[in-house]
Amino acid sequence: MQTEHKTCSDACYQCAIACEHCAASCLNEEDMAMMRDCIKLDLQCAALCRLVGQFMALENAYLQPLCRVCVDVCKSCAEECSKHPHDHCQQCAQACRTCAQACLQMAA
């Protein structure tokens, strides 16, 4: 795997882990209704990031378009998570921003 592919793949998998942790942690928050959008985006982002990581390993022809979508989803998830003061949300937002930046470089 090429170095830039590995860097992006690692960022994708780290983001997926952070998003899954955030979603699980949000389920334990007092006002779960307020966390609904966060949970939904966390789960969508995690699924997409895992898929992009898999495609990265395969060096698939669809990698660039998938990376472009991943940038958008990661940015949306980061924006939503940033609204919440919880540590898990803030950590997830940072992981999403890192992944978005790595995918942006791959999509170029």
Image (spheres, rainbow, N blue to C red):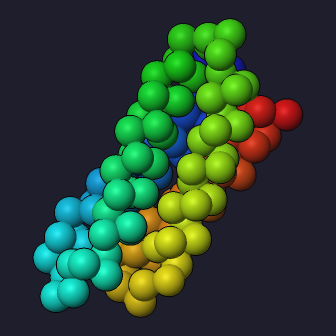
- Asked whether residue 23 appears in the rendered view, the answer is yes
Between 37 and 50, the residue placed more toward the observer is 37
The vertical placement of 87 against 80, above or below, is below
- Asked whether residue 5 appears in the rendered view, the answer is no
The vertical placement of 91 against 8, above or below, is below
Query: As drawn, which residue projects farthest toward the right?
Result: 108
Q: Quadrant of residue 30?
A: bottom left
Query: As drawn, which residue projects farthest toward the front?
Result: 33
Residue at 66 percent across and 47 percent down: it is: 71
- Residue 40 location in percent, x, y? 35, 57
- Residue 52 location in percent, x, y? 53, 30
Residue at 25 percent across and 72 percent down: it is: 26
Tell me: 48 left or right of 59.
left
Tell me: 58 left or right of 59.
left
- Residue 56 location in percent, x, y? 57, 22
Q: Quadrant of residue 2?
A: top right
Q: Quadrant of the N terminus?
A: top right
